[in-house]
């Protein structure tokens, strides 16, 4: 196994692997990222693939993930904020890129200067056009239609007017409309009818844009669940988020049946092991009491590291056995009940794997916390060093 801290990662200074040792870490397998890109690229070809790396690549590290995805054939990068893409530009990533969630204070001028495509739902159009005027460089714009999600996007009622305004700015040389896109609400539940309704509305919006004379490079609609379940949503490009990280968007289908490989493994060294009597309380509130004499193991990861405080019974693999978290997750730590029959010497300092290859699935932590896999990986905090590896992991290197 080759383990290294990515030099550009802001987490590098926080990474004890500099001293070739570690206490807690999220291992990120960049070969899994590349495999997932290749698998999805083959599935959607000839449509292009946009690697969605918002929120620090769902907690995996935006710069190394973006590089790995591009290396494996992703032709676009997507993120919510212009500032997220600017950080990638600073790191030397020059691929076509789109940002889609703006405020009145978004640095549109920098986006234009850095060749970042800008999603426009309505109010942004005039602001972007003015930024382009100041920059003396046309903005590249993707117009967003709200086909039913009810977040960003132009309503169908206002679409013709938005197209008209965009055409006028384009005529003036201030912008170029290169894309039309929308976002789906229920593609993770393939039996629901709303995806068909959204798809119909999207087709209409695209047709109107083409009738208005725009020469569109990319029409795009599909997120990970639609990529996997609705080939009729692929159009010219798909926006791959969760699947890039090897996780399944479906409640009833696991990553392996979709041909995906999870890229993150979260682990820590057991920080303490001790024998306690029956009826001993565990953690704040003493919500758990031991029902017999037993050993308690202490895992040094808590809600400050992104382990949800509400988690109950989260799985932890230690010495080949899956234990369950007991008692409340605290800020820095939680406890597992190891039972009475262990050799404490084998557990003190042992590696505790919370999720990832060779360990429990991240979905078990999501279920234990009343949330989804997206949130579990994305919330792993900067206190947990990311360590980048290539290829299959053996027992963790020390
Ligand atoms: C986050 C996001 C995606 C990626 O969604 P996944 O389900 O993670 O693939 C795609 N498009 C938009 C607009 C998004 O905000």
Image (cartoon, rainbow, N blue to C red):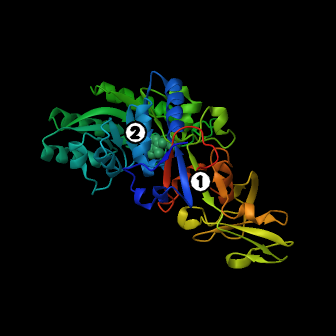
Q: Disc count in the image?
A: 2
Q: Is residue 59 visible?
A: no
Q: Is residue 387 above or below residue 160?
A: below
Q: Residue at x 39, y 41 (%)?
A: 78
Q: Earlier in the sequence, mark 2 or mark 1?
A: 2
Q: Is residue 98 above or below residue 41?
A: below
Find residue 188 and report its horizontal and vertical position in percent. 60, 40
User: Label 2 CB, ligand 1: below 8 Å?
Assistant: no
- Determine contact: label 2, label 1, CB under 8 Å: no
As rendered, which of 230 and 351 lies closer to the eye?
A: 351
Find residue 75 and report its horizontal and vertical position in percent. 38, 31
Find residue 373 and report its horizontal and vertical position in percent. 60, 49
**Disc 2 from disc 1: Cα separation:** 22 Å
Q: Which residue is mark 2?
A: 67
Q: Quadrant of the N terminus?
A: top right
SS for dot 1: strand
Crowding at label 1, few (<14), some or many (≥20) Cα neighbours within 10 Å?
A: many
Q: Residue at x 22, y 48 (%)?
A: 110
Q: Which mark is residue 142?
A: none
Tell which residue pokes out farthest to the top in this image.
46
Q: Is residue 126 visible?
A: yes
As rendered, which of 59 and 182 lies closer to the eye?
A: 59
Find residue 205 and report its horizontal and vertical position in percent. 39, 32
Q: Which residue is mark 1?
A: 266
As rendered, which of 22 and 374 lies closer to the eye?
A: 22
SS for dot 2: helix
């Amino acid at each position: 196994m080759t383990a290294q801290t990515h030099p550009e990662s802001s987490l590098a200074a926080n990474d004890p692997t500099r001293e070739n040792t570690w206490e807690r870490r999220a291992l990120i397998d960049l070969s899994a990222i590349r495999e997932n890109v290749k698998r999805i690229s083959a599935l959607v070809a000839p449509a292009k693939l946009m690697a969605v790396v918002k929120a620090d690549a769902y907690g995996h590290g935006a710069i190394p993930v973006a590089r790995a995805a591009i290396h494996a054939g992703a032709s676009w990068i997507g993120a919510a904020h212009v500032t997220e893409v600017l950080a990638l530009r600073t790191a030397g990533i020059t691929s076509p890129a789109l940002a889609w969630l703006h405020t009145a204070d978004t640095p549109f001028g920098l986006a234009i200067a850095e060749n970042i495509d800008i999603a426009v739902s309505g109010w942004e159009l005039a602001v972007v056009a003015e930024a382009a005027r100041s920059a003396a460089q046309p903005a590249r714009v993707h117009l967003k239609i709200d086909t039913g999600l009810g977040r960003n996007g132009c309503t169908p009622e206002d679409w013709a007017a938005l197209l008209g305004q965009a055409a006028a700015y384009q005529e003036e040389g201030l912008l170029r409309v290169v894309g039309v896109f929308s976002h789906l609400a229920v593609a993770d539940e393939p039996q629901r009818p709303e995806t068909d309704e959204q798809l119909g509305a999207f087709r209409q919006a695209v047709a109107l844009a083409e009738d208005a004379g725009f020469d569109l490079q990319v029409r795009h609609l599909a997120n990970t669940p639609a990529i996997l379940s609705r080939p009729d949503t692929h159009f010219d490009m798909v926006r791959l988020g969760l699947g890039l990280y090897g996780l399944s968007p479906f409640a009833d289908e696991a990553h392996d049946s979709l041909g995906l490989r999870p890229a993150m493994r979260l682990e820590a060294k057991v920080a303490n092991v001790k024998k306690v009597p029956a009826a001993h309380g565990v953690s704040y509130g003493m919500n758990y009491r031991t029902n017999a004499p037993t050993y308690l193991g202490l895992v040094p990861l808590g809600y400050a590291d992104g382990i949800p405080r509400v988690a109950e019974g989260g799985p932890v693999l230690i010495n080949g056995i899956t234990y369950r978290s007991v008692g409340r997750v605290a800020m820095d730590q939680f406890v597992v009940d190891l039972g009475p029959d262990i050799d404490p010497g084998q557990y003190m300092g042992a590696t505790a794997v919370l999720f990832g290859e060779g360990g429990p699935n991240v979905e078990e932590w999501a279920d234990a916390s009343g949330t989804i896999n997206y949130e579990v990986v994305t919330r792993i905090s900067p206190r947990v060093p990311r360590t980048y590896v290539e290829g299959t992991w053996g027992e963790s290197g020390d």
